[in-house]
């Protein structure tokens, strides 16, 4: 576990040092504009579904999220919270987690079916996270 976290942290430093976070923040800010609070939890969700770890998603995309927050003058705390809320949705559709639970339940080979069964729940959770984050970031955290 320590090797994985160290690797994620090293990659996050490379991303920061080479300006990748800034470039991504500028691009997403230009595309999403003031609707970024709707996108913020989806970034966390994507990161966790790919990496299998909330910590890794936060390490990779925390700097990016803060870059967008600063660009629009948004609360970094609220944007960070949206990132973490999105991460929990990503945990639900992470292939590694599907493999782990399928193995634990003796459902070998059923990972795809398990993930498909989770999609409606993930979609509902994502919509609620997007709306909640938008309200929090845009209105409550000013």
Image (cartoon, grey):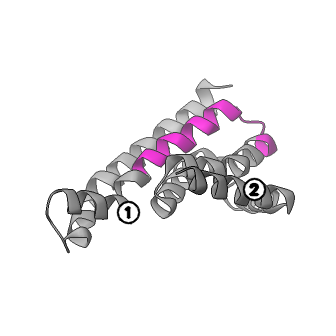
Dot 1 or dot 2, earlier in sequence: 2
- Magenta stretch, residue numbers: 70-89
| Residue 22 in the figure: left or right of residue 65 | right
Give the overall secondary structure of the magenta segment: helix
Query: Closer to the observer: label 1 or label 2?
Result: 1
Where residue 103 appears, x then y in whole percent?
Answer: 22, 62
Name the residue located 25 percent from the left edge and 57 percent from the top edge.
101
- SS of the residue at dot 2? helix
Local packing at callout 1 (Cα closer than 10 Å; few below 14, some 14-19, many 20+) is some
Instruction: Residue under label 1, please give it.
Output: 96
Where residue 54 appears, x then y in whole percent?
Answer: 51, 47
Q: Is residue 105 above or below residue 110?
A: above
Q: Is residue 17 magenta?
A: no
Image quarter hosting the C terminus: top right
Of residues 33 and 122, the one nearer the viewer is 122
Q: Confirm whether residue 15 shows in the render.
A: yes
Instruction: Residue under label 2, please give it.
Output: 25
| Residue 136 in the figure: left or right of residue 34 | left
């Amino acid at each position: 576990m320590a090797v994985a976290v160290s690797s994620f942290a090293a990659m996050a430093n490379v991303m920061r040092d080479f300006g990748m976070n800034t470039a991504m923040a500028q691009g997403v800010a230009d595309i999403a504009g003031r609707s970024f609070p709707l996108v913020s939890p989806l970034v966390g969700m994507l990161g966790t579904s790919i990496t299998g770890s909330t910590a890794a998603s936060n390490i990779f995309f925390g700097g990016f999220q803060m870059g967008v927050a600063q660009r629009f003058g948004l609360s970094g705390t609220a944007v960070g919270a949206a990132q973490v809320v999105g991460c929990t949705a990503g945990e639900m559709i992470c292939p590694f987690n599907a493999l782990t639970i399928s193995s634990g339940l003796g459902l070998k080979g059923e990972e795809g079916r398990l993930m498909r069964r989770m999609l409606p729940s993930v979609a509902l959770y994502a919509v609620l996270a997007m709306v909640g984050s938008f309200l929090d970031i845009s209105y409550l955290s000013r």
